[in-house]
Image: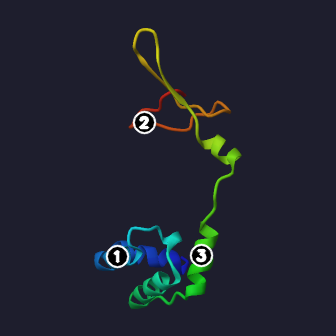
Amino acid sequence: MNKFHEFYTKIVADEEAAKEISAILEGKPMSAASDEQLEKIGAVAKRLGLDISLAEARDFLKAEDKSLSDDDLDAVAGGSVKVDKDGDIIIDTRNKQGQCVCSIGLLVIGC
């Protein structure tokens, strides 16, 4: 287990530490944290027995910050909602390739 996964596991198990990190981030995602915020989070990690440097945190967040290309988005997004002539709602969840990409509740619709 890498130290970031271990850190996450410890934060989930420690409500006080989770609240502290939430307060440090001020509602922003970790990927938008400033160096000052990451250093404060590093201090929380150190209290939990993990030594995470600012450079390691930045490298980890940079590796995790991957955007989807338009082709990737087309592969996972799509579908439509229509009302037929009888007033029935028709939900089609297929992407452009015809693959089912979503479910609603426990029912998979349009596949």
Q: Residue at x 60, y 85 (%)?
A: 55
Q: Which mark is residue 23?
A: 1
Mark 1: amino acid: Ala
Is tag 1's residue or tag 3's residue first in the polypeptide sequence? Answer: 1
Is tag 2's residue or tag 3's residue first in the polypeptide sequence? Answer: 3
* Neighbour tally class for label 2: few under 14, some 14-19, many 20 plus, Cα within 10 Å: few
* Neighbour tally class for label 3: few under 14, some 14-19, many 20 plus, Cα within 10 Å: few
The residue pinned by badge 3 equals 60
Q: Is residue 87 above or below residue 103?
A: above
Mark 2: amino acid: Ile
Left or right of 58? Residue 83 is left
| Mark closer to the observer (1, 3) | 1
Between the C-alphas of marks 1 and 2, the distance is 34 Å
Q: Is residue 79 above or below residue 13?
A: above
Between the C-alphas of marks 1 and 3, the distance is 21 Å
Q: Give residue 48's position: percent from left, percent from top.
A: 39, 87
Q: Mark 2 falls on what kind of element?
A: loop
